[in-house]
Image (tube, coloured by chain):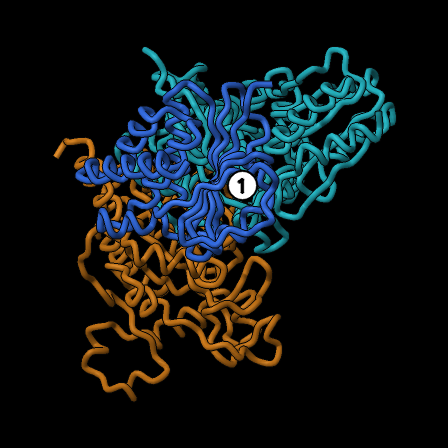
Amino acid sequence: MAVRHEVRLSGSGGQGMQLAGIILAEAAILEGKNAVQTQSYGPEARGGASRSEVIISEAAIDYPKVTQPQVMLALTQESYNKYRHDLAPDALLVVDESIEVSDDLPTGTQVISVPILRSATETLQRPIVANIMALGVLVGSSAIVERESLEKAVLNRVPRGTEDLNRQALAIGFQLAANGS
Amino acid sequence: MSPTVKLLQGNEACVEGALAAGLKFFAGYPITPSTEIAEHLAERLPRVGGRFIQMEDEIASMAAVVGASLTGAKAMTATSGPGFSLKQENLGFATFTEVPCVVVNVMRGGPSTGLPTSPAQSDVMQARWGTHGDHPIIAIYPSSVPETYELTIKAFNFAEKYRTPVILLMDEVIGHMRERIELPDEPPIPIIDRAKPTVPKSEYLPFDESQGDVPPLANFGEGYRFHITGLTHDQRGFPTSAPDKTAVLLDRLHNKIYNSLDDILLWETIDMEDAEIGIFAYGATARSATRAVRLAREQGVKAGLIRPITIWPFPDQLIAQYAKQLKALVVAEMNLGQLVNEVERAAQGQVPIKRVLQANGELILPETILQAALEVK
Amino acid sequence: MLAEKYLRDAMMPHIWCPGCGHGIIMQAVIKAIDKAGLDQDKTVIVSGIGCSSRASGYMNFDTLHTTHGRALAFATGVKMANPELNVIVLTGDGDALAIGGNHFIHACRRNIDITTIIFNNSIYGMTSGQYSPMTPHGHLATTAPHGNMDRNFDVCELAKAAGATYVARSTAYHAAGMADLIGKALANKGFSVVEAISQCPTYYGRRNKQGSAIDMLNWQKEHAVNVAAAARLKPEQLEGKFVIGELHSSSAPEFTEQYDQLVARLQGRE
């Protein structure tokens, strides 16, 4: 069976996790891979913890839900607490520096704790691009898609006039990944 | 021209398929998890000269679709469980008056308001028998985003060819998940339009069985001046209570579907050639079942998937055929036992049947199905 | 002859009881269609369920006899999908205002170009005499054997409040005037409502001791006050009477016209 990458992006509702998931899946598709993206709907999408999940594979994707993420992002403590329980062994866990990481993670979990929210707010003065920055960190440290495809996918999706801002956010994300690993 | 590769939701793929099939009218009412279909058509339809309307309720949406179709427009509505319940009377009207249309039901957890954002497959019997009276119905059910596109076109083709409403069943998983899809510039299958009358206008009979099981349907506004009623009607469409005419009408209604099963029944099988354990699953559950088949094969268990794409009419023959071959048949569905009863009826006791039933708002895990397959091995 | 041109001989005899006012109203509709010069091939008659709704079957047009209460919703689909068609809805007081009440107010609100004639006989006749939203308070019906506790609608006020752009009322007795009012309703580009008061001697009149059909027609004559005359009367002088004539006329954007404009704009044809 071809390698199947399961990715979970989590944060609070409004942090743009759904868009981040769509962008990641579209980046994979740009590379000719298969991708499936699912998300949480309903009240939890309006605040509280929110998640978006992506499966990337060279082969056909049968079961479309994530059961054991090999890659996970958590931008808030609440989303970390709620969604970390089924991590795969040796998973990559990217968290915002504000998150207190527990000691119950599976053995081999690689934790990358970097200042995503602070960088978005302080360096770019635009907390809204934290999701794009987080994608930079995630892809920079996991290489589940190429940086080039991710950038293309981001620019395909973001509003006109915000391209430079999002490029900067991505670049900072990749830099954080390089520093953090 | 090369196809456009996109990441689309099942609901969006349904919209693309409908437009490719020539949809010109959509009436709907907001309901999760089908609302994206209405939202996208509100944006797209006027651009292609079509009409979108958000009606005052689900009942009105179904009614408006029938009215629009009678003017010749390809028409559709989309809903979920509670709305599907409300549409049933007018859906029955459409079956009896033989007005082509497509009704999408993106299934969510029930009963009642249930689980609006969670998947279920608990309306499959309602799709068959939700409206009162003896009536045939065609219901088809995709299990991927690309297949949603193709089957939406197919739904319109069946509706037009057989002059009947067609139900496109989906579930919340398929409706909401985003998946890679290749959208061709041209529809991948020929588009079918309803047969038009060839007789002089004054001689037109909208329900004339001598024209075959599917009499041509004229458009309102073209001078045929015909009558449509939900009362039992004769060839002319005029009310009748004569037992012989009633029988002729009801027989033809059934014949037009059941004499065309070769055309209407669609299914897919995986690894069934040498299978000893069959897994019967449809919609999103078939995705779990596909994984279960692979996992079972990895363990040396000869498992295979039987996936009906046409749910109604039920593929009796398909089940009967494999019932002889298999040691056991696992039926997995997101309800507490609906199509499994049809499987048991069609299998006629020739194979033991194991039920994997789950109605908790979650897609059945592949491991759950695998476990059942290993137990019956 | 109008009957030859506009009625379906094959559907006769009709189901209406002797003395029923519905035939008079259908005749007024036909006269108005004829006078307006509507293209018979471009006119669609839509009806619901009940005695009045059988009229569609008798009329030689494209005709759609739908489910109970839903005529306006079906008609909305017809008109939206082909705005060139003249769409006329024939419905009853129970059909339009009880089971179909929601569709009624929303069709008014949309101001879609449909002319609706409400055959108001104050009762469910087809099912032999249950009270409707138009049965007066205190009157008798099979389901109100001790007197009707509901208050009845003033359907014309309802239509006006909900946004209809033409509203009129007439009676079977005033058949000629009714045809004129229906003609004006057909001419209005928007949603038009004509309340046509009818008599049901069989299931309403007899139970409520209103006498024969002729007595009931005379009651209509004696209790109707023309809108012009009513304007000169004091409220107490109108006690127990009802006003007939054109009650409301206004202009507002019509729904399908607006949609056509949207299509033209999006397709760059404007």
Q: In this view, does B30 lie above or below B70?
A: below
Write down the colour of chain A. blue
Q: Which residue was labeled with disc 1?
A: B172
Nearer to the camera, C216 or C94: C94
Q: Residue at x 83, y 31 (%)?
A: B375
Q: Nearer the viewer, residue B243 or C154?
A: C154
Q: Which chain is cyan?
A: B
Please tell me the colour of chain C.
orange
| Res. B138 image quadrant | top right
**Helix, strand or loop status at disc 1:** helix
Three-letter code for the amino acid on which mark 1 is drawn: Glu
Camera-nearest residue between A148 and B131:
A148
Residue C43 appears in view = no
The residue sitting at 33% across, 50% down in the picture is: A117
> Measured from the top left, where is residue B128 in percent x and y?
65, 37
Out of B293 and B126, give the one closest to the viewer.
Answer: B293
Residue C39 falls in which quadrant of the image?
top left
- Residue A178: percent from left, percent from top: 35, 34
